Every structure is written in structure tokens, then in C-alpha cells.
Image (cartoon, rainbow, N blue to C red):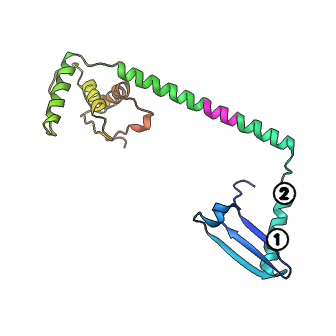
Amino acid sequence: IAGFHAKGYIFEHKDYSSMVIGSSNLTSNALKVNYEHNVLLSTMKNGDLVDSVKNEFELLWQKSTPLTQQWIKSYKESFEYRSLEKLAEVEQTQMLLADKVKKSVEIVPNLMQAEALRSLKAIRDKAKDKALIISATGTGKTILCALDVREVNPNKFLFIVHNEGILNRAKEEFKKVLPIKNDSDFGLLTGKHR
């Protein structure tokens, strides 16, 4: 049964039956220490509740798969294969991220950008929180912004431009400079999409 997680324990006594039904595994910590929700019920031998739980248990028992050495071997192979598959995915992701970080570190500021970055740092060092950079087209303002974001490393940042085409190109420039994990780390708010 997929997602089977029921926990119930039946204890047969001479004249009555007891059941513990709840979230605990049958371990000392689960029953004595951990914060668990369990109900202890006692009922006369063959009471309705006990019969109902026993019948459910028998149905589950009949559907169970015998635990054999072959089953254990097969499960172990399947588990190891899935583990190796997951490890390969993690290694691939790490390599992609390392490559992005390496490429983002390789992007260095030009002379104008370096001077502007020093000025922005000086402004921040004076505890000021406003600055304006004016520069001609094609001098690298977008990369400058991305380099500054990389330096400051905020949780979030907002980049505003007057044209959606510029915004899309800027997004690609920011992706080159910042060690971004995936595209969903960026959002666009335009007249067409949000």
C-alpha cells in the first residue's frame, strides 16, 4: 500500500484486549520521550472495536509481500540505483552552479564601472542610501548594476527600466554576473506579464 503509515499495536490478555493506536513507533523514545499522539484502549475479548481492528490487520496481512532474501536484495539494488541516480543529479547541479559562479567571478569591471563601484561603496560607508549614476549608452551601466548587486549581496533587488526589450537583455546580463541558481530567481513585472 503506497503511503502506508498506520501504527497500531494489539495486546491480547486473558479476558480482554488492549490497543495502542497513534503516531508512535514501537520504540522506547517514541513511547516514553517523544511528543506523540496515542490512544490506549482496552475492551472485552472480541469487542466490536478489537474485531474491526483485527479484521483490518488481517486484510493488510494478506496483501503483504513476504520478506525474503530475494526481496531484500532487489530492494537494496533499487535503493542503491536511486541513490546513485540522485547523487549524479546533485553532482550535475553542483557542477552547473560552480560553472555559473566561476563565470560570474570572471566578469570584472571596466574603468568606468570600477570607479563607479568605488563611489557607491564610499556612499554606503557614509551610511547614505541614495545614489544616481548617469552614463552614456553602451558604457556598461547594466553590468555595473549587476556588479554592485553582487558586491552588496542583498536578499532581493529591483531593477527598473523603461522598455521591456532592455529589461529582457538586462536579465541576461544579470545572469552572467550573479551566481543565480535558476531562472525562477528572476521575476519580470511589465505591461504584458507579471
Per the rendering, the mark at residue 87 is: none
Secondary structure found at label 2: helix
Structural crowding at the residue carrying mark 1, measured as other residues with C-alpha within 10 Å and reported as few (<14), some (14–19) or many (≥20): some
Q: Is residue 23 visible?
A: no
Magenta run includes residue 84: yes
The amino acid sitting under disc 1 is Lys
Q: Would you say the residues marked 1 and 2 are in contact, meaning their CB atoms lie under 8 Å apart?
A: no
Structural crowding at the residue carrying mark 2, measured as other residues with C-alpha within 10 Å and reported as few (<14), some (14–19) or many (≥20): few
Q: Is residue 186 left or right of residue 73?
A: left
* Point 21% across, 19% down: residue: 139
Q: Is residue 26 above or below residue 164?
A: below
Per the rendering, the mark at residue 63 is: 2
The residues bearing labels 1 and 2 have C-alpha atoms spaced at a distance of 14 Å
* Point 81% across, 42% down: residue: 72
The amino acid sitting under disc 2 is Lys
Q: Which residue is mark 1?
A: 54
Magenta run includes residue 99: no
* Point 44% across, 33% down: residue: 181
> Picture coordinates of residue 158 (x, y %)?
28, 39
